[in-house]
Image: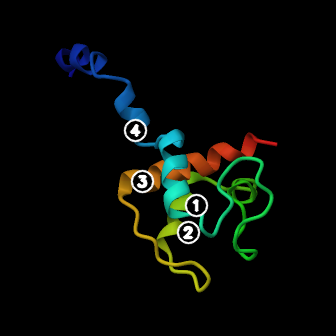
Amino acid sequence: MIRWLPMLLMMPVGLHAQEFGNSEAGLRVAREACASCHAVEPGQNQSPRSQAPTFTRIARIPGMTTTALTVAMRTSHKTMPNIMLEPGELRDVTAYITSLHKHP
């Protein structure tokens, strides 16, 4: 075990961050895949479709996490089309949405 420690310490730290997604890339995906129904930009108060909550509103739901968003986005909804995102795109979008909880 000890002999593996130097190799583990040399592994790039950025690899772990990829598991959580990239919020900037998530905004790009959201603009392409979600903006026809949802307000995806910070500060937008009204979605193009009135029944679709803004991404900021979704982010402020108590207990909202990337895990909860991932489950919600993989589950069919009567009012939401089944948008098929690649796993990396899904991680990026959920990272972006959860980053919005701190925006005014």
User: Which of marks 2 and 3 precedes in the sequence?
Assistant: 2
Look at the numbered disc 4 and give the secondary structure of its residue: helix
In this rendering, would 55 be left or right of 77?
A: right
Question: Mark 2–mark 1 contact, CB under 8 Å?
Answer: yes
Residue at the image point whose x is 40% and y is 38% from the top: 18
Quadrant of the snapshot with the C terminus: top right
- Residue wearing tag 3: 89
Q: Position of residue 89 (x, y in %)?
A: 42, 53
Residue 26, above or below 50: above
User: Which of marks 1 and 4 precedes in the sequence?
Assistant: 4
- Residue wearing tag 4: 18
Q: Which mark is residue 40?
A: none
Q: Position of residue 34 (x, y in %)?
A: 56, 63
Q: Position of residue 53 (x, y in %)?
A: 72, 67
Give the Cα distance between marks 4 and 1.
18 Å
Q: Residues within 10 Å of mark 2 (few under 14, many from 20)?
A: few
- Single out the mark in the foreground, 3 or 2: 3
Question: Mark 2–mark 4 contact, CB under 8 Å?
Answer: no
> Closer to the camera, 94 or 68?
94
- Quadrant of residue 36 within the rendered picture: bottom right
Q: Residues within 10 Å of mark 3 (few under 14, many from 20)?
A: many
Residue at the image point whose x is 24% and y is 13% from the top: 6
User: Which of marks 4 and 3 precedes in the sequence?
Assistant: 4
In this rendering, would 46 be left or right of 99?
A: right
- Residue wearing tag 2: 72
User: Which of marks 3 and 1 precedes in the sequence?
Assistant: 1
Give the Cα distance between marks 3 and 2.
15 Å
Give the Cα distance between marks 2 and 1.
6 Å
Residue at the image point whose x is 68% and y is 57% from the top: 55
At label 4, which amino acid type do we have?
Gln
Question: Mark 4–mark 1 contact, CB under 8 Å?
Answer: no
